[in-house]
Amino acid sequence: MHSRIMFVNRSPRPSARYVPYKTALLIVGGATGLVGMLLDVHWMVVLAIAIVGVGFLLRFLPGPDETDNGVRPDHIPPGGSE
């Protein structure tokens, strides 16, 4: 009987292109949420949730393809190959 004690994920890691933006949005959204809760301002808490939500949605934006090197596959320069 084969049991998996440890599973190693060898799939490519997502691009870290938006990490600074996600971090900044998390900090700003968290601070806005804390201030909104402290002052009991409902719209500020909703704004904080929206800010953190935008940071979460950045995860789903397509990042650059690391194997692409900036050349479109349908574009072949004159003279043959790259």
Image (cartoon, rainbow, N blue to C red):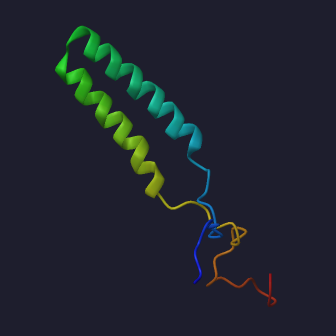
Vertical position of residue 49 compared to residue 74: above or below: above
Question: On the rendered image, what quadrant is the N terminus found in?
Answer: bottom right
Number of labels in the image equals: 0
Image point 25% across, 21% down: which residue? 44
Q: As rendered, which of 10 and 49 lies closer to the eye? A: 10
Q: As rendered, which of 17 and 37 lies closer to the eye? A: 37
Image point 36% across, 34% down: which residue? 51
Picture coordinates of residue 15, whole percent (x, y) = 61, 57
Picture coordinates of residue 74, whole percent (x, y) = 61, 85
Picture coordinates of residue 36, whole percent (x, y) = 27, 16
Q: As rendered, which of 82 and 49 lies closer to the eye? A: 49
Tell whether 26 sits left or right of 38: right
- Which residue sits furthest top? 39
Q: Which quarter of the figure has residue 40? A: top left
Vertical position of residue 57 compared to residue 46: above or below: below
Picture coordinates of residue 43, whole percent (x, y) = 19, 23
Image point 43% across, 41% down: which residue? 55
Tell whether 81 sits left or right of 24: right
- Which residue sits furthest bottom? 80
Tell whether 45 sits left or right of 78: left
Tell whether 56 sits left or right of 3: left
Question: On the rendered image, what quadrant is the C terminus found in?
Answer: bottom right
